[in-house]
Image (spheres, rainbow, N blue to C red):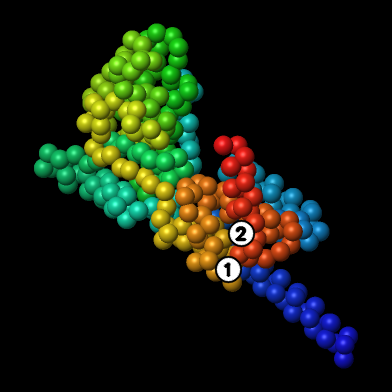
Amino acid sequence: MFAYSIKRSKFAADKSKNMANADQILSLIRNHLNNDDAQFRKVALQVSAVEAKNGHAILARTIQELLSQKKTTFSSLQIVTRNKDVDDLLLQVETFDDLKKLVTSNEVKEKISRVIKEYVKRDELHKYGLANRRKLMLYGEPGTGKTMTAGVLAKELNLPFFVVRTEKVITKFMGETGLKLSKVFDFIAEVPAVYLFDEFDAIGAQRGKDNEVGEQRRILNTYLQLLERDTSESFIIAATNSVESIDKAMFRRFDDVIEYTLPDKAQRLELLKEFLYTAKNLDFEEIEPLFEGMSHAEIKMVCADIFKESLLDDVKISATLVKSVVNMRNAICRKIG
């Protein structure tokens, strides 16, 4: 009877483990059918980690090797040929997230939805001498979704997505930065796409500051002129964490200025349920206050650590585990500053 009980318990444990794998397989299929490459890769890596822990090293390694290949079977990236003048100034990035994946305030979502709607109906607007919004300034705390928004626009509008490499554009040689900006804007006019100028304060800082020199003022004036003259169909997006440093003249050149803030309670719950979606019995309301004050990016990073701890120590994701990982992170943050 005792032996039967042990065997029955083992069967139940094996069944539970198989059910977990079944959930992952179903998730992989759903993500493939939804063309959600980012989520597909995330689940596949989780499967690889589980298989490695179960002693199936060859299978785990094979999964990782397949995922490390340059393109997935349903990649949507279409490489845009760039001329040598801008080849090192622009980085083309593949986009996976649509508007549904953007966790932010209703106000921000409404503004982004409006931008998308205006682009879709731009020909109708043009008939009445109106232009669609396509020059946007995004500002707010680091890690709150500014860069993701640019990618979302590219995904929703089926446009290529380029990040302008500010570190390559800005140089110490007089006149060279202005020349490089002109080349970038020439490309913007030629190739309709979404262009992100990240850390925009490097270009748009206020004139007349103590540390400003003539060259910095020339860079700012050049950008203002290029932005004002631009009549392309491309989206030009400037993102900054330091809106107070941006020259006031710059704001008038953009069609919309959008503020990004740290996630509120509802947004934190949404993020936690997305990033810890395998924790079926976790009380998210209980753990949510632990993440107050964190940005979207920080919550994602902490959740990844929670998931790793769960896999490495072979334990379920519980409120105790979550508190332990968050406390460890907070201790490190206090130590460094």
Judging by the rendered image, the residue that carries numbered circle 1 is: 282
Q: Is residue 277 above or below residue 247?
A: below
Precedes in sequence: disc 2 or disc 1: 1
Q: Is residue 235 left or right of residue 325?
A: left
Q: Nearer the viewer, mark 2 or mark 1?
A: 2
In the image, residue 48 lies at what x, y percent? 70, 55
Q: Is residue 95 above or below residue 222?
A: below
Give the residue drawn at x 47%, y 50%: 293
Which residue type does callout 2 highlight? Answer: Val
Q: Secondary structure at mark 1?
A: loop
Disc 2 residue crowd, few under 14, some 14–19, many 20+, Cα 10 Å: many
Give the residue drawn at x 58%, y 51%: 302
Which residue type does callout 1 highlight? Answer: Leu
Q: Nearer the viewer, residue 104 or 176?
A: 104
Judging by the rendered image, the residue that carries numbered circle 2 is: 322
Cβ atoms under marks 2 and 1 closer than 8 Å: yes
Q: Is residue 233 left or right of residue 313?
A: left
Residue 136: quarter of image: top left
Q: Is residue 26 left or right of residue 247?
A: right
Quarter that holds the N terminus: bottom right
Specify whether residue 123 is in view.
Answer: yes
Give the residue drawn at x 42%, y 30%: 199
Q: Is residue 196 left or right of residue 40?
A: left
Q: CA distance from mark 2 to mark 1?
A: 10 Å
In the image, residue 300 lies at what x, y percent? 54, 51
Q: Secondary structure at mark 2?
A: helix
Q: Residue furthest left?
A: 128
Specify whether residue 30 is in view.
Answer: no
Q: Residue furthest bottom?
A: 1
Q: Nearer the viewer, residue 109 or 19?
A: 109
